[in-house]
Image (cartoon, coloured by chain):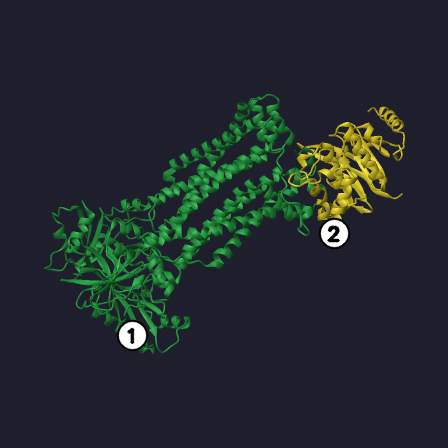
Amino acid sequence: MFYRILMKDLKHKWGINVILFLFMTLATVFVASSVNNILVISNATDYCMEKGSVGEVYVSTFEVEGEKTLGEWLKGNKLVKNYSKNEAFILSSSNIESFRGRDGSEYQINGLIMLQNQWHDNMLIYDQEGKLAHLNDGEIGMQQKELDRNGLKVGDTICMKFGNIKKEFKIALAIMDPAFGGDYVGTTRYLISDHDLQDIKDTGMPMNYNYNINTYDKDAFSKAMNKQAFSIIISIDQDMFAFSYIVSMITAGVLIIVGICLIIIAFLILRFTIVFTLQEDYKEIGIMKAIGVRNFMIKKIYLVKYLVLVCLGTIIGCFTSVPISNWMLKSVSKTMMMENASVNFGINVICSLGVALLVLLLCYLCTNKLRTFSAIEAIRSGQTGERFKRNSVLFLHKRKSMPTPLFLALNDILSNIKRYVVLILIFAIGTIVIILPLNAITSLKSDEMARNFALDLDADFYLNETVKDNDNVEVLDRKALIQQMDTIKEDFKRKNYDMDINSIGFYSFSYYVEDDDDSYQFMTFIPLNTDGSYIELLDGTTPVNDNEIALSEKVMQKMGVNIGDTIHVKIGDDDRKFIITGSYQNYMQMGQSGFLSANANVDGVNSSGCWYYQCYLNNKDFNNTILTQIREEFPEYTIYDVQQAMESQLGSTSSQLDNIKIMIVLLISIINMLITILMMKIFIMSEKSQIAVLRSIGYSLAAVRRWQILRIGIVLAIGVFTGAILSIPLNDIAVRPIFGMMGATHMKIQVNAIEAYLVYPLVMLGVILIAAFIGSRSIKKLNLMEINNAE
Amino acid sequence: MSDQLRVRNLCKTYIINKRQNNVLRNVNFEIEQGEMVAIMGPSGSGKTTLLYTVSGMDKVTAGNIEFFGKELSGLSDNEVSNVRLNEMGFVFQQMYMLKNLSIYDNIILPAYQSKEKTYTRKEINGYAVELMHKLGITEVADNDINEVSGGQLQRACICRSLINKPRIIFADEPTGALNQQSSSEVMKILNQINREGTSIMLVTHDQKVAAKCERILYIEDGNIRDEIRLGKCGESSDRREREKKLSTWLMDLGW
């Protein structure tokens, strides 16, 4: 009998059961893929570092003859566990002869490029399939973003010259570089064969030496090394490598938020569906009780039925979640090496089992309610057993002009507010999931962001040009940097562009407060051809005198100093004292930097480069046409507007950010659409008799559909409104910390109100109303004769 | 009197499990304006199908249904809905009403939706109160549908069917779920409505109910086998004589 009841139930209520099954599948897919993504993403940087055999500290140096080298210092150092030393060649645009039939001068270089072979046991480089990259002689590999920057593709050739030899390389693969793959790192690596590198080395070109170091005490090691005066090009610790994936991590963070929201949505849907379907069965439950079936037996029927459905749903959901998880991770794993979601299939299985148990628990708890109602009540009411509970809240006869479909919709919601609160929550979460990333993306593209990149918004354009001296980049002092700016200025003047130009020089100095054993190495900025007053301060004043300095808030916190205190800075061989005049925040070096005055005496001290050359036209009114014209007239320079300058640092373009935005909107729209269609089907199925009554008394199909659509529309509107309101405090709670990690803890989250609170909510509304319209089509199929079969 | 409803060669076929089931076969009849007609017949003979088909709630397979000169099968879904809303009233065996509305609101619902009738909402409300008063359910007007008895609910359903002043009321076993007293009250009301000029076509198994109708059609195997005309049932008419006449006729038909 038990089996017969079950089979009859599955057959008779196939519609509701199919919906229940779909929701269970959906919940499994959401939970399994989201948990999998969260795990993959949160382990991604560790995975990346491990896969790349990245040491705790990576230092790249020039080793000058006669000076003590880092290699010598490392030998036998008690703080060092082990280290590897490798060679590379720093590539400049003057090394590029031609590429893809274009002149080498047009080759776009952003930051430092190291040409090197595979180092075999550390700082490893992989191919797209995750296999160790291997290149034959005459082949070269570079990251996809490098290929994209110069319009190259695998198979193209690139000609280079090194001293007296020329080499033609065929681009054999787009490499995955776990160490330097992050968007936020200013260095990239081109991979060539061992033999080709030896050929270049044989020309006598100066090489740089790269140390990959593992220590016993990283902090102590860093402080000890900072006390030495090695000619360091870059020094990056493993955390910094990991952090360079910040843009990917922001995307990943967004996916985690989306994932968490999906899990919440999944459980809300499940609860809603189970409670709803059990309420629908109330009359039958009453009949079973009336004929003497024991409570536990009734429960068993439901538990077995749900077990059958949940087993089917979770098995299908478990397998479906893998490709969905991979699809969601695709946008993050373009530059970042990540585990394949299918590797963690066990997680999917555990999540699916979790969903199954939860469904059964929910079912058990819901059926517990049976005990509280008598059989007679269940039979007589035929609905929810709440026979004497008043349903109507609004009164139609008191409404002077409200159309009846609207009245019915409003009255339904108010009469069963508990049921619709779940839906409101689902839509509110959907809205938050769209608005928060949208605000994060708007902030990433904002002027506020540009200011935090130490860009002067008053500049007309920004120029990025590697300082050249023969074939390799020299480390130059302030005088040389200003000379370089004068050269650029002259170049432009020759073509009738009179302009002012300024920049910021970068230096790496050691800082300490009292004890030089407690030293820190920080990037230090010195304004060139400007007083630096455009750099916004959080507090205090811009340093003006030779002995004044402003520090980033993070440095002040790290060193435990305040405005007015004095700190020591080792500049060259001098140990000098500086008074702190102000604090600021920006994204340079993850918010850890110092800022000396334009009058600071650093003559003869080598810089490690300079920031964008900020250009201000004097004899022309600047506009986009002029910008295009300048680009055409000066192909040898890389010229950016403020947006592009910022994007170049973030490593992502507006279109990429827009793609993320579209992906999220698309994902949430699909989910909302699916939920709406399924909810509509559930409502229609359970309201067959109500619809049949309306149709029989002459309500047209359109009027009935209006009722159904308006009801979901009102719920949606409340949900979207709630979501929009909740997203305001959530901006500070969820979005601001992401920017804080990048260095600007006080970043004002930028909101494009029209986009966030009008356009996208309207898109959501549109999508869901379309879904509701589609879902309501099943009303047409409803046979009015059902009125006799309905409860 | 002119024909209000004229049914010609009406056929209705259902396909169930690939098997053709001819529920109605060439049914022909008319209902004149102001007439009260009962459909009787054994279970499964097609009574309810006939009622739903001629009222436009179900589509015909073949044949014509002419309602005041309008061919129902030629009308669009919206036009049929419009006819049902403005010119027809429905009373079912189960007292179907919207569960989230009060009795009063359920009654006025069709009138508020009607665009053809030009009554104001105030006038509609007034008329609903008048109907409820007439049918004796004023005191439960603001109650929910689960707060009243079956008889009160059926009277409320009749009020709803009358709210748009229809030309005809279709009733499917209107007393089927009621006790004898409630049943008798409901029939009294229907007779009164009929006397006021509204035609009624009702399906019933109950001889007492059918005896209160002017004409009875006997349907068997999807076809009208016979009919009997008992004449108008006035307040003073001899109930027993009508019932006896009907009973004899039904016995002759093998009922």
Closest to the observer, A284 or A163: A284
Residue carrying label 1: A489
Q: Is residue A618 left or right of residue A703?
A: left
Quadrant (top left, top right, bottom left, bottom right) of the N terminus of chain A: top right
Kindly indicate which chain is depicted in green in the rendered structure: A
Element marked by disc 1: helix
x and y percentages locating residue A560 in the rendered image: 23, 54
Kindly indicate which chain is depicted in yellow in the rendered structure: B
Quadrant in the picture for residue B150: top right
- Spatial separation of the CA atoms under disc 1 and disc 2: 82 Å
Q: Residues within 10 Å of mark 2 (few under 14, many from 20)?
A: few
Q: Amino acid at mark 2?
A: Thr
Q: Residue at x 59, y 40 (%)?
A: A683
Element marked by disc 2: loop
Chain of the residue where label 2 is placed in the rendered structure: B
Q: Residue at x 75, y 44 (%)?
A: B128
Quadrant in the picture for residue A143: bottom left
User: Please, is residue A199 above or below residue B9 in the view?
Assistant: below
Closest to the observer, A263 or B235: B235
Q: Amino acid at mark 1?
A: Lys
Q: Is residue A496 left or right of residue A319?
A: left
Residue carrying label 2: B120
x and y percentages locating residue B15 in the rendered image: 69, 34
Residue at the limit of the structure toward the front, as seen here: B139
Q: Residues within 10 Å of mark 1 (few under 14, many from 20)?
A: some
**Can see residue A170?**
yes
